[in-house]
Image (cartoon, rainbow, N blue to C red):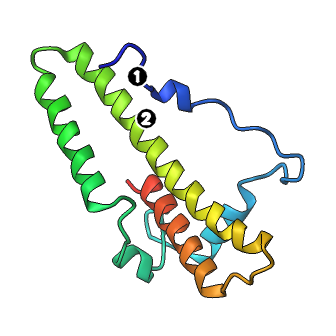
Amino acid sequence: MSERDLSTRDLAEPPETNDNQPDDASEPLARERDADETTADGSVEQEPDSTSQEREPLLSGDESNRFSSRWHEVQAGFVDEPRESVAQADSLVAELMQQLAASFSEERERLEKQWDSGDDVSTEDLRVALTRYRSFFDRLLSA
């Protein structure tokens, strides 16, 4: 590891408050859950959609392979250096999160450039972007 690797602590800064956002941020989620079916045990079962069945990769194949390879190295080193492995795992997760955030940021920037230049952004482009956000969001919340 380098002298100062990125860590999840670096990424965990509290988000800036947005005065335009409603106080109860959970309200839209509650409405979405109302639209889903509740199972006998009280858990929420979401309706399947095309994004859950045909998920687009979040990273290119090369990037995914690189992160997977590094993860296997971290795991392999645990027996000899458990503390170092945990530090490396934290750094790797932080780097992956940063890579994903950069990817979403680039996509948003591309759409905003179209808006700013007066070009119409197609509903299909916006649908694809929102579908990608939803897929990522669902993956983060999945068990």
> Between residues 139 and 5, which one lies in front from this camera angle?
5
Instruction: Return the residue at label 2.
Output: 94
The three-letter amino acid code for the residue at tag 2 is: Ala
Q: Is residue 129 above or below residue 25?
A: below
**Looking at the image, which residue is at 10% across and 15% down?**
80
The three-letter amino acid code for the residue at tag 1 is: Asp
**Looking at the image, which residue is at 71% across and 66% down?**
112
**What x and y, as percent, mark residue 122?**
66, 86
**Mark 2–mark 1 contact, CB under 8 Å?**
yes
Instruction: Residue 34: give its label.
Output: none
SS type, badge 1? loop
Q: Is residue 104 visible?
A: yes
Q: Earlier in the sequence, mark 2 or mark 1?
A: 1
Instruction: Return the residue at label 1.
Output: 5
**What x and y, as percent, mark residue 117?**
78, 73
User: Are there few (<14), some (14-19), or many (20+) residues within 10 Å of tag 2?
Assistant: many
Q: Is residue 35 above or below residue 79?
A: below
> Between residues 64 and 16, which one lies in front from this camera angle?
64
User: Are there few (<14), some (14-19), or many (20+) residues within 10 Å of tag 1?
Assistant: some
SS type, badge 2? helix
**What x and y, as percent, mark residue 133?**
54, 64
Left or right, 59 with reference to 79: right
